[in-house]
Image (tube, rainbow, N blue to C red):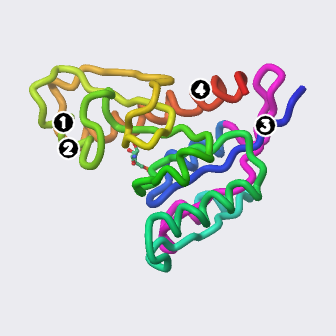
């Protein structure tokens, strides 16, 4: 039996954060027990703070507006994560572009609301919805310096051709909630 510690990074609503904690925190999968040791947010007003709190998971707030540069913020973020001694960092709607200070030092995975390598970066949900494609989906990938450019760990798609935007958005979130916990377990079992 091995205990694997993770930290979850988020910026807003925190629906993925909540789903990850509810599904994984202090649960055992095969020989791996997962502990979500903390959540970290760059937004003091993020709704996810309350959500994590419900499960007894503390949030650490690192307000990016209090730092002079991306590098200064990333240096503090890396130090904070390293002090937690986690096996894996999980980015669940963490809306920050990361510098090599982060990507060279932290093993992290991220969820993105498109079928990568399509629609990398901001407004992926809107661009995916508006495209001529009949299918859309979500991806979990390794975090590297190129935004949304790392190796794909998990993906799931669905037919979007009959959907309005609200239905599409709800389906994206539902699909994220289906594949993200499985992807975290899969990665932790290889560490
Ligand atoms: C998700 O759609 C994720 O793919 C994107 O930001 C959104 C976060 O949603 N990067 P939530 O905060 O987990 O509800």
Circle 1 Cα neighbour tier, 10 Å, few/some/many (<14 / 14–19 / ≥20): many
Q: Which residue is mark 4?
A: 182
Circle 4 Cα neighbour tier, 10 Å, few/some/many (<14 / 14–19 / ≥20): some
Which mark's residue is nearer the viewer, 2 or 3? Answer: 3
Q: In this rendering, would 161 be left or right of 187?
A: left
Q: Which residue is mark 1?
A: 129
* Residue 55 appears in the picture as rendered: no
Q: Is mark 4 within 8 Å of ligand 1?
A: no
Q: Nearer the viewer, residue 166 or 148?
A: 148
**In this rendering, is residue 73 above or below 191?**
below
What kind of element bears circle 1? helix
Circle 3 Cα neighbour tier, 10 Å, few/some/many (<14 / 14–19 / ≥20): many
For the record, the magenta segment spans: 24-49
| Residue at the extreme left of the image, as rendered | 132
* Residue 105 appears in the picture as rendered: yes
| Residue at the extreme bottom of the image, as rendered | 66
Measuring 70% from the left and 44% from the top, which residue is drawn there? 6
Q: Which residue is mark 3?
A: 4
Q: In what quadrant of the picture does the C terminus appear? A: top right
């Amino acid at each position: 039996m091995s205990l694997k510690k993770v930290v979850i990074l988020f910026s807003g609503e925190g629906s993925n954060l909540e789903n990850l904690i509810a599904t994984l925190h202090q649960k055992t999968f095969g020989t791996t027990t997962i502990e979500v040791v903390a959540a970290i947010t760059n937004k003091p007003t993020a709704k996810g703070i309350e959500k994590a709190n419900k499960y007894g998971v503390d949030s650490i707030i690192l307000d990016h507006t209090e730092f002079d540069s991306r590098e200064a913020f990333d240096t503090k973020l890396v130090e904070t994560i390293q002090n937690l001694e986690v096996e894996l960092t999980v980015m669940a709607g963490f809306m920050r572009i990361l510098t090599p200070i982060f990507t060279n030092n932290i093993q992290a995975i991220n969820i993105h609301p498109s079928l990568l390598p399509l629609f990398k970066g901001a407004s992926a949900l809107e661009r995916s919805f508006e495209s001529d494609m009949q299918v859309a989906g979500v991806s979990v990938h390794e975090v590297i310096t190129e935004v949304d450019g790392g190796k794909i760990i998990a993906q799931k798609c669905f037919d979007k051709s009959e959907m309005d935007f609200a239905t599409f958005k709800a389906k994206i979130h539902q699909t994220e909630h289906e594949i993200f916990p499985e992807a975290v377990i899969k990665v932790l079992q290889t560490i």
